[in-house]
Amino acid sequence: MVSAPFSNPPHIAPETSFADCLRQVRRRLVLKQTSLSLPMGCSDAAISLWEAGQRLPRRRNLHRLLEAMDACGATAAEQLSLQQAWARDRSAAEFRLRSLPAEVWPPSSVGTPGA
């Protein structure tokens, strides 16, 4: 009997963070962070920061990530979950930044995040 290289995709809850969603999908695909980072042209440390919830990828890296995940067998539902989680987390991060006092985060000196 030949076993599949990865398990059936589990349901990803709608409120799952980008970090948790990325970790779940990568582990289901049985990928190491390095295996995912190489085709994207980024470091495995970047993947680690994303999975730890310490950073969010920029938009162009999100698209590279989705392409790499697609090539590795991620389902359309998983890719959509990643996109939605990224958008939610990014909106929340931008809201937190806007809530900071002007001395900490002057909006006039900051360009468009993730451009």
Image (cartoon, grey):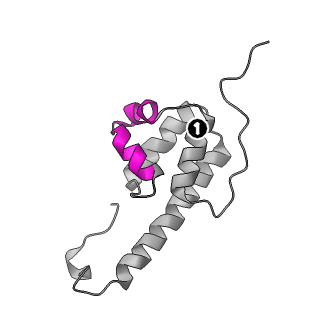
Residue drawn at x 53%, y 38% is 69
* Side (left or right) of 96 relative to 110: right
* Residues drawn in magenta: 33-50
Dot 1: what SS?
A: helix
- Magenta segment: does it hold 59? no
Q: Is residue 18 above or below residue 65?
A: below
Residue that badge 1 annotates: 27
What's the magenta bit mostly, secondary-structure-wise? helix
Residue drawn at x 24%, y 81% is 104
Image quadrant assignment for residue 64: top left
- Image coordinates of residue 66 in percent, x first then y, are 51, 43
Image quadrant assignment for residue 106: bottom left
- Image coordinates of residue 2 in percent, x first then y, are 75, 14
- Image coordinates of residue 23 in percent, x first then y, are 55, 46
Classify 10 Å Cα crowding around label 1: few (below 14), some (14-19), many (20 and above).
Answer: some
Q: Quadrant of the N terminus?
A: top right
- Magenta segment: does it hold 43? yes
Q: Quadrant of the C terminus?
A: bottom left
